[in-house]
Amino acid sequence: MNSDIPKVNRNKKSLALSFADTKGVEILHKLAASCDVLVENYLPGTLKKYQMDYDTIHKLNPRYTHPPSNFLAQPLQTPKPTNLSPPPA
């Protein structure tokens, strides 16, 4: 094992969920309701069949940002701004 891995992953937690199981999707939806970013590495459109695409998660959490794993090929999906007035001077 590389000696840098424990240093880089210190204080991190990981979780494995089955998207084919509805309980796994429910757990992910609960976590997504309070997250800022969810990173995935699936082909475009794959998460939609598991109800974990940007539109579904964004309904649960309006602050949610979805950086695609292949960010050069896919656009970054972010919430639309609600306040378009300029900042106070």
Image (cartoon, rainbow, N blue to C red):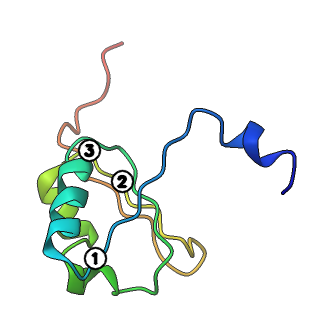
Residue 56, compared with residue 5, is above or below; it is below
> Which mark's residue is nearer the viewer, 3 or 1?
1
Nearest the eye: 66 or 84 = 66
Q: For mark 1, what is the residue?
A: 19
**Contact, mark 3 vs mark 2 (Cβ under 8 Å):** yes
Residue type at mark 2 is Thr
What is the crowding at mark 3: few (fewer than 14 residues within 10 Å), some, or many (at least 20)?
A: some
Quadrant in the rendering for residue 26: bottom left
- Say which mark, if any, is on residue 51: none
Residue 78 percent across, percent down from the top left:
34, 56
Q: Which residue is mark 2?
A: 65
- Say if 83 sits above or below 43 in the image: above
Point 13% across, 53% down: residue: 60
Q: Is residue 2 left or right of residue 83?
A: right
Q: Secondary structure at mark 1?
A: loop
Residue plotted at (84% across, 45% down): 4
Q: Amino acid at mark 1?
A: Phe
Q: Residue at x 23, y 39 (%)?
A: 84
